[in-house]
Image (cartoon, coloured by chain):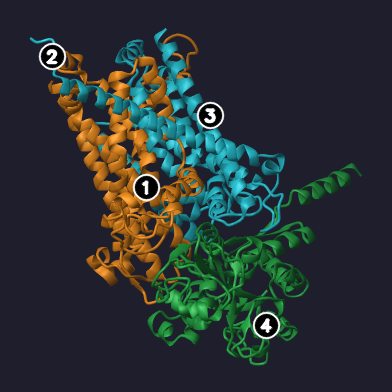
């Protein structure tokens, strides 16, 4: 394309008119391809970085993977002295705390989102949402700080009364030391509620007013309109926010390790101390004596990465189909 | 229809459930206020001049501060921005202006993937990538870890704000004879600049609080870290170490550090939204 | 003339802004109060040397030393032969153990209503940590403390969640006094604890003991003192109940001084001696024989020299016992092995 220059005869370079020597900006014109290349490199560098990350996790966990295979996920022993590593206590702890956190956060978060989207006057709704979104900016370590010095003492004083009522359930048995799955779940719930509120509120607001009007025309109460029409319509977006919160809760490190007790055991009682994958990595990484130990921890990291990757993919899928739903409607 | 339509049961259910939602909101907002108030109360008590200008005192002695942690955090954030922001911006321009079908999908999907990586796993990655080959912990490693964490958000927010610029502006530029790159640099980016700046600010605020990746990269330092190649202290790590320690004075300093960190983050978050609102007003007004 | 003045000015300003020599070390939380004091004192004497010591646990110190990410390590549980070989392979240098001070693991507790010093028999401590003794008013504990009203409350056992030399000293002692412990659990910086909560570092364990009523944990003496935590007496091999302090710890080391192995890796738990405190230990600095950075190497050597001589006067204010002179002499000899 650009070979015309070769056939142009030698002429003095003009300084005015359309044939003038091009300024820097005009030379950028030729730079369209260069810009494309640079931005392409920038975009694909992310793919390179991610590939490198996966590769490093894979390579640096090989000793553990070869030693334990799939049994790694289901063995309960974590014995650094004898080189026996099993991930089950941490997988269990991660799942239990995250599920419990969601069980607490979803009703409260959804309830707040409904209030803010359907009931509150717009200015109040905007103001409160702004404040709640600020909660999302609070770092994990500060949640941990508040967890240790405020939440745990509060829970410790309240727990004897709680156990009088619910202590017959196996999940609420045993002495409460303050640090436990339950405390970690409460802290996690506080951390993910802002996401559920923010995203759910947005999708609820996006529900077309025609849906609401139709229900009202049929004589429904406000609650029935909300619960039977608006929320189901926004169902996929809400589910997406839940999955996103789950992914966040699974990977949370600092707040959890400060309030969960850091004991590698599997316990049916929620009031017992436990451990999660992220917490054990943070605690034991810099001092894993011996390569097998280190590789076992990195394999835990690989497991966590795989799980969060799957959850995030599901969340994205849901959000995408939500958008599709809107277009179809 | 009778005068009691809808039925009393349905009315009761209506009032109860709606009140419950109000209670939920109240609960969430009060939790926020409790955390902030508690932090303010305990943190403000421990704030004094020593806190800001002194280095940590030996264990058991009083009068120390966290000057090295504050400087360390600032250095780490500067380095992280240097790494994360340019890549995020350039990638965002790519996705918004150039990317075709599958290439754009690949980059977008991978960006979301990278965004979802737990921070502790990122710490492992940078430990094996930077710390082990270099044979020491360093501010550089910490900066790289935080920088990589910044990329996805910077990229997606840049892309979103660039996409939001109306096509008509781009077409106008091209119609006037500008090349694609000229249009991007002189028309599209300036139109989206407020949003992009907001995105970057929120991004920095997000990584400023990250602790886990720093545990295996920047490590820690009771003195000021000279240059970029030595381990460094940082506010989040100091908060963590002091919070789990038994010393009351360190607890005080943890509160104060938490207060300083959170105030900084909230200030940046609020400022970012103000910038965005201003930008929206300018483009619509 | 002006040129010379300028040159002089440049040199002086350059040296004023000279980068300080930063030595990075990591490991034992047991010795952290001592090392942080040393780092601070040493910096006052040599303003351009910063000894950056990170308290991450002995296991961590050994790990990072072998990986080569720190200049020196610190531990209260000596490196095993396997670890030494690994270090040789990975870093291409031998690691030398240098004892720096003597300290003690104390059984620290927080029992509601009990403000006296409890006496613990070896069987009591082993039983508690094996999970066999679960209540404070158990016979084994009560019989050694006849006048004390112990509550009928569950014992909350606290141990280390990280790899620890403090743990090593504790389980080394338990293995010597309890055959069951030795066969079931064994010795190491990290063990498979039958019961208990994990705290990170001596700091974390102290924090947990302070916060949880009816808890017991093992921590270095200075942590109990600085944090006003009650700690008990332990029955030694002569049958006497001994409290950990400078004299009892020094006596524990006295027996082993003559038989100190050449590489200084010795255990002094449950040592003979009427007044010896049975859960005492040396704490070591782990110094590589070869260091590539000569500036750092010289600074490290100078710091070590200071620590073994002048630095010893900072041990007693922090409740560590200073090194016996005989041991210091042997160590100064070993310093000749350092290839810098």
Q: Which mark is residue B5?
A: 2
Q: Quadrant of the C terminus of chain C?
A: bottom right
Local packing at callout 4 (Cα closer than 10 Å; few below 14, some 14-19, many 20+) is: some
Q: CA distance from mark 4 to mark 3?
A: 56 Å
Pointer 1 and pointer 2 on the same chain: no
Q: Which chain is green?
A: C
Q: Colour of chain B?
A: cyan
In the image, which is nearer the foreground, mark 1 or mark 2?
A: 2
Query: Is B65 located above or below residue C196 in the figure?
Result: above
Q: Position of residue B60 (x, y in %)?
A: 68, 58
Name the residue at 78% across, 58% down: C44
Q: Is residue B220 left or right of residue C183?
A: right
Disc tally is 4
Query: Which of the marked residues, 2 or 3, is nearer the chain's N terminus?
Result: 2
Q: Quadrant of the N terminus of chain C?
A: top right
Q: CA distance from mark 4 to mark 1?
A: 47 Å
Provide the chain ID for the residue under circle 1: A
Q: CA distance from mark 2 to mark 3?
A: 51 Å
Residue position for label 4? C334
Task: Name the secondary structure under disc 2.
Answer: loop
Local packing at callout 2 (Cα closer than 10 Å; few below 14, some 14-19, many 20+) is: few
């Amino acid at each position: 394309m650009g070979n015309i220059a070769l056939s142009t005869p030698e002429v003095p370079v003009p300084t005015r008119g359309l044939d003038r020597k091009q300024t820097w900006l005009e030379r950028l014109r030729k730079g369209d391809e260069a810009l494309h290349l640079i931005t392409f490199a920038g975009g694909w560098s992310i793919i390179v970085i991610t590939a490198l990350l996966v590769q490093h996790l894979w390579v640096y966990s090989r000793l553990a993977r070869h030693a334990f295979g799939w049994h790694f996920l289901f063995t309960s022993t974590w014995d650094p002295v004898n080189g026996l590593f099993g991930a089950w206590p941490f997988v269990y702890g991660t799942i239990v705390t995250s599920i419990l956190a969601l069980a607490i956060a979803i009703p409260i978060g959804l309830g707040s989102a409904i209030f803010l989207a359907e009931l509150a006057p717009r200015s109040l709704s905007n103001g409160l949402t702004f404040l709640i979104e600020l909660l999302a900016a609070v770092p994990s370590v500060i949640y941990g700080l508040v967890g240790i010095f405020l939440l745990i003492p509060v829970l410790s004083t309240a727990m004897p009364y709680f156990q009088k009522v619910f202590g017959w359930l196996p999940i609420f048995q045993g002495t409460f030391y303050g640090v436990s799955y339950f405390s970690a779940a409460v802290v996690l719930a506080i951390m993910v509620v802002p996401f559920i509120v923010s995203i759910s509120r947005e999708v609820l607001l996006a529900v077309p007013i025609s849906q609401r009007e139709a229900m009202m025309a049929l004589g429904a109460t406000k609650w029935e309109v909300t619960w039977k029409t608006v929320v189901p319509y926004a169902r996929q977006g809400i589910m997406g926010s839940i999955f996103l919160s789950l992914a966040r809760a699974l990977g949370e490190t600092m707040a959890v390790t400060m309030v969960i007790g850091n004991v590698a055991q599997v316990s049916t009682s929620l009031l017992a101390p436990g451990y999660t994958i992220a917490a054990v990595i943070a605690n034991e990484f810099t001092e894993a004596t011996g390569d097998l130990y280190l590789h076992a921890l990195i394999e835990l990291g690989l497991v966590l990465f795989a799980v969060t990757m799957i959850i995030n993919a599901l969340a994205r899928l849901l959000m995408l189909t939500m958008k599709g739903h809107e277009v179809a409607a | 229809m009778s005068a009691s339509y809808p039925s009393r049961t349905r009315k009761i259910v209506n009032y109860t459930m709606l009140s419950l939602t109000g209670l939920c909101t109240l609960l969430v907002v009060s939790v926020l206020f409790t955390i902030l108030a508690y932090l303010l109360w305990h943190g403000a008590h421990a704030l004094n001049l020593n806190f800001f200008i002194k280095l940590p005192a030996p264990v058991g002695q009083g009068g120390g501060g966290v000057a090295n942690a504050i400087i360390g955090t600032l250095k780490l954030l500067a380095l992280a921005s240097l790494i994360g922001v340019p890549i995020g911006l350039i990638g965002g321009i790519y996705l918004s202006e150039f990317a075709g079908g599958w290439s754009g999908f690949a980059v977008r999907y991978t960006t979301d993937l990278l965004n979802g990586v737990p921070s502790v796993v990122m710490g492992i990655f940078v430990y094996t990538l930077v710390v082990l080959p270099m044979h020491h912990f360093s501010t550089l490693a910490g900066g790289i870890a935080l920088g990589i964490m910044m990329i996805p958000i910077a990229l997606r927010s840049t892309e979103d704000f660039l996409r939001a610029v109306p096509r008509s502006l781009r077409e106008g530029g091209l119609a006037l004879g500008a090349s694609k790159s000229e249009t991007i640099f002189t028309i599209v980016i300036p139109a989206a600049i407020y949003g992009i700046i907001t995105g970057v600010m929120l991004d920095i605020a997000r990584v400023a609080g990250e602790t886990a990746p720093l545990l295996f990269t920047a490590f820690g330092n009771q003195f000021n870290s000279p240059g970029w190649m030595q381990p460094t202290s940082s506010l989040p790590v100091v908060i963590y170490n002091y919070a789990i320690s038994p010393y009351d004075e360190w607890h005080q300093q943890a509160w104060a550090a938490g207060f300083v960190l959170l105030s900084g983050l909230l200030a940046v978050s609020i400022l970012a939204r103000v910038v965005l609102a201003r930008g929206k007003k300018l483009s619509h007004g | 003339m002006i040129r010379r003045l300028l040159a002089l000015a440049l040199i002086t300003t350059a040296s004023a802004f000279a980068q300080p020599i930063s030595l990075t070390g990591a490991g034992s939380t047991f010795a952290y109060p001592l090392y942080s004091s040393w780092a601070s004192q040493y910096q006052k004497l040599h303003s351009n040397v910063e000894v950056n010591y990170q308290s991450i646990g002995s296991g961590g110190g050994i790990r990072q030393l072998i990986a080569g990410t720190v200049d020196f390590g610190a531990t209260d549980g000596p490196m095993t032969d396997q670890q030494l070989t690994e270090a040789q392979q990975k870093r291409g240098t031998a690691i030398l153990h240098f004892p720096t001070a003597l300290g003690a693991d104390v059984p620290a507790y927080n029992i509601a209503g009990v403000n006296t010093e409890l006496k613990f028999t070896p069987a009591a401590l082993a039983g508690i940590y094996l999970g066999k003794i679960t209540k404070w008013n158990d016979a084994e504990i009560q019989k050694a403390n006849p006048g004390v009203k112990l509550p009928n409350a569950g014992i909350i056992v606290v141990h280390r969640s990280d790899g620890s030399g403090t743990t090593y000293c504790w389980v080394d002692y338990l293995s010597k006094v309890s055959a069951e412990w030795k066969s079931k659990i064994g010795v190491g910086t990290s063990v498979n604890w039958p019961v208990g909560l994990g705290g990170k570092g001596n700091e974390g364990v102290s924090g947990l003991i302070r916060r949880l009523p009816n808890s017991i944990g093992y921590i270095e003496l200075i942590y109990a003192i600085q944090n006003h935590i009650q700690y008990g007496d332990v029955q030694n091999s002569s049958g006497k109940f001994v409290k950990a302090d400078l004299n009892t710890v020094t006596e524990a080391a006295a027996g082993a001084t003559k038989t100190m192995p050449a590489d200084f890796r010795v255990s002094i738990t449950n040592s003979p001696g009427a007044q010896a405190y049975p859960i005492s230990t040396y704490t070591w600095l782990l110094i590589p024989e070869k260091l590539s950075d000569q500036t750092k190497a010289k600074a490290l050597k100078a710091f070590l020299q200071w620590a073994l001589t002048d630095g010893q006067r900072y041990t007693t204010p922090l409740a560590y016992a200073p090194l016996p002179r005989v041991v210091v002499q042997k160590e100064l000899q070993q310093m000749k092995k350092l290839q810098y």
